[in-house]
Amino acid sequence: MTTYIPFIKKPPLVAVIRLTGVIATGTRGQLNDATLAPVIERAFRKGKPQAVALVINSPGGSPVQSSLITARIRRLAEEKGVPVYAFVEDVAASGGYWLATAADEIYADESSILGSIGVISAGFGLTGLIEKIGVERRVYTAGKSKSMLDPFQPEKPADLKRLKVLQEDIHDAFKRQVTTRRNGKLPEGEDLFTGDVWLGHAAIEKGLADGIGHIVPTMKKVLGEKVRFRVYGPRRAMLSRFGLRLGADAMSALEERAEFARFGL
């Protein structure tokens, strides 16, 4: 039986939030604000942590979800006065790097991939296929732009022009996020927003990270050898705990592997 002794100061606590996977809306096993909101809230509020550590391994995804998750972390960090540290594992690219900017300091492994500050859209053109198998595409719209970028119709220059405008607006928001959160750390006169990526030491030289470091030794250096860690993360469904995926979950797994494969992972 443990006896409670009041006024005994506990060792400092670090709340650890694991952010692993593709960032996407409403898909089980992927990162989005709806799924992560209770996780982030518990991490900042439970046990009065002295710091919150983000362990990131994400190739990116939805810019909106990246922004929502990052804004929630920053809002709670400022409300609670708790510093945030990010630790990049394999990759924090595109939206994954957007998440890293929620931290006051970013650390990475020497072989971690960081960056890809850009916007990408991808799809398939199936016009030749449906013609070959004798299928006729019928689309009826009210509004000339309603069928924009229909994969079953030939590309239209006007659609591509509109898409470019949307991409540039999202890219501008991404650049503002990075320049604001990394203010004073980025080299002057250098374009870091081309979509390029860098490994650990090069990312530090570019101002995208603060040092090479792993979570346990770094947080011990900051808060002392007796620091405690409490890990938070979304609860997984019962089937996925046993490695079983059905239907849409299996497709999500393939899409996730494809996103990581873009960075050789």
Image (tube, rainbow, N blue to C red):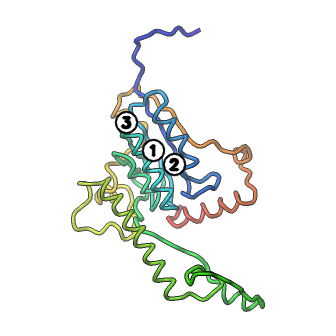
Q: Amino acid at mark 3?
A: Val
For the N terminus, which image quadrant? top right
Q: Residue at x 39, y 62 (%)?
A: 174
Judged from the image, the secondary structure of the residue bearing numbered disc 3 is: loop
Report which residue position mark 3 lands on: 82
Report which residue position mark 1 lands on: 54
Farthest residue to the front: give it: 142
Q: Is residue 178 left or right of residue 20?
A: left
Viewer-nearest of discs 3 and 1: 3
Mark 3, Cα crowd under 10 Å, few <14 / some 14-19 / many 20+, is some
Percent position of residue 256, x then y: 60, 60
Q: Are marks 2 and 1 in contact (CB under 8 Å)?
A: yes
CA distance for labels 2 and 1: 7 Å
Report which residue position mark 2 lands on: 19
Q: Is residue 41 left or right of residue 207?
A: right
Judged from the image, the secondary structure of the residue bearing numbered disc 1 is: strand
Residue in front for this viewpoint, 202 or 157: 157
Percent position of residue 141, x then y: 64, 82
Mark 1, Cα crowd under 10 Å, few <14 / some 14-19 / many 20+, is many
Q: Amino acid at mark 2?
A: Leu
Q: Amino acid at mark 1?
A: Leu
